[in-house]
């Protein structure tokens, strides 16, 4: 399984993904699920993926190689689209293209053609945005009312986001929230695992602000894991006694 | 959907269930999912159920009316079995009986024959225990290493249990943990809702120690909901700044 989360706040965008992939319990491996396209000052786009790895890799490959566009038949890549919505449409078209080629064969072999993708970033002249692209190639966009999207194993890490996150959360705090949400998921579900990939993009900077890979030895992640567990235990200790006699 | 949790600690047993039932978004209602059988000083048993309500009600009904037992054909109820393991076997038999009668018809109409049940309690002369009974009528028993079982919408409320709960947690703290785990679930998933039913049974007392129904107006539940949210936000505020420059 997988856990990826994207948080779109007033200051910018945070994307975080795990890297555990499994095809059965005896075939567990590590694959990066985050890809970044960047031309600093002009565009920065990032995609996090969940679901069938053969499908998501085929989609990313098409986004790099380009898809035929218009009458002339020239190829368009994520480096060519003019708005983030066009980028989401291109991701959707890439997905439909993979489905047209591989969908039947995948389903004939009893596997499910199922993926989800988070696309976030900004292109010069356009607003920053965060999209959730579905298997069918259609998509929704995050808003100030619903400023985060999750894909994969989403439930363990949702309560902390529901309780703390808003559109006005700072970019740094959004990054910390993503890490706490990921930590809750990693602890409770063995199919989600380190290393993590995190990308932070500040609004209107049109480049990656910070990009880190976080493994088990990362001192900051270890520190907040420990602090968070201690804080939860301490908060729990302070709850008042049961009233029912 | 549903969320029920059973916590078996050294001091005793806590069972907590929500009461929201839905057959589609336009058919939401309230049903108690917790049933208690008690002969104080001799036995106390409680069952929390999730899944298809017609099936779980049919199972509870059979456990009250009794199932034919042995050559003589006399009926055995949960008030007759001699050990908790026999009680779990009886629940399994009741489930298989309902499956034999209704299984085919349910599946013909496109519904899934799927339930899960938590059975906990103690019978005089036997140890206290907590069982998770599956749709097939088979079951597993909680141990000191794995002292809690969840059924229904289990993921939202798992991280707090994974982080705080052990077999040595006191009975009162186990009850608070169940409530916090439920609160996280109720907040993040609209298919789980109040009122809640909670039963606490102290080891070797052979009776219900406390039984409460908790609705939206319950001052204690409202208080710990608020305190927990505030504590999480405060704990989050105190996390150290990101180190990556």
Image (cartoon, coloured by chain):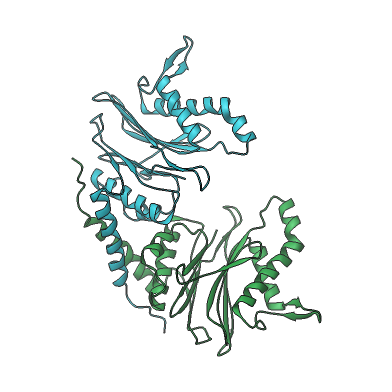
Chain colours: A cyan, B green
Q: Nearer the viewer, residue A85 or B136?
A: B136
Residue A218: % across, % down? 26, 48
Residue A103 coordinates in the image, percent (x, y)? 58, 30
Which quarter of the picture shows residue B176? bottom left
Judged from this view, the residue extending furthest toward the bottom is B41
User: Quick one: quadrant of the C terminus of chain A?
Assistant: bottom left
Side of B178 relative to B91 (left or right) = left
At which x and y percent is residue B116? 59, 63
Does A119 appear above or below B93?
above
Q: Residue furthest top?
A: A72
**Horizontally, is A177 left or right of B150 in the view?**
left
**Is B15 rendered above or below residue A114?**
below
Determine the image quadrant of residue A132: top left
- x then y, percent, for residue A74: 44, 12
Q: Is residue B204 left or right of residue B221?
A: right
- B137 over A41 or under it: above or below: below
Can residue A78 be seen at all in this image of the molecule? Answer: yes
Would you identify the image quadrant in which residue A187 lies?
bottom left
| Residue lying at 77% horizontally and 78% vertically, measured from the top left | B70
Relative depth, front residue between A39 and A122 = A39
Note whether A134 is above or below B86 in the view shown.
Answer: above
Name the residue located 28 percent from the left edge and 46 percent from the top edge. A174
Task: Judge from the rendering whether residue B188 lies leftward or rightward of residue A14; answer left or right.
Answer: right
Front residue (pair A77, A139): A77
Name the residue: 36% across, 66% down.
B164
Residue A14 visible: no
Q: Residue at x 58, y 53 (%)?
A: B26
What is the tally of numbered marks visible in this picture?
0
């Amino acid at each position: 399984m997988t856990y990826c989360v994207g948080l779109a706040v007033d200051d910018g965008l945070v994307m975080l993904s795990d890297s555990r992939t499994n095809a059965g319990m005896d075939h567990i491996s590590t694959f990066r699920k985050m890809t970044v396209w960047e031309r600093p000052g002009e565009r920065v786009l990032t995609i996090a993926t969940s679901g069938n790895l053969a499908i998501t890799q085929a989609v990313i490959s098409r986004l790099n190689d380009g898809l035929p566009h218009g009458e002339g038949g020239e190829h368009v890549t994520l480096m060519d689209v003019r708005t983030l919505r066009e980028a989401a449409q291109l991701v959707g078209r890439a997905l439909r293209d993979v489905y047209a080629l591989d969908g039947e064969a995948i389903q004939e072999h009893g596997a499910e053609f199922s993926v989800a993708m988070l696309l976030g970033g900004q292109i010069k002249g356009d607003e920053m945005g965060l999209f959730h692209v579905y298997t069918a190639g259609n998509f929704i966009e995050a808003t100030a009312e619903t400023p985060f999207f999750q894909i994969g194993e989403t439930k363990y890490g949702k309560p902390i986001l529901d309780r703390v996150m808003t559109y006005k959360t700072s970019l740094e705090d959004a990054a910390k929230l993503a890490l706490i949400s990921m930590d809750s998921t990693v602890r409770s579900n063995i199919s989600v695992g380190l290393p993590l990939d995190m990308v932070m993009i500040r609004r209107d900077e049109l480049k990656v602000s910070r990009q880190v890979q976080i493994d088990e030895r990362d001192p900051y992640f270890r520190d907040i894991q420990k602090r968070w567990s201690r804080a939860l235990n301490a908060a729990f200790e302070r709850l008042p006694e049961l009233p029912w006699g």
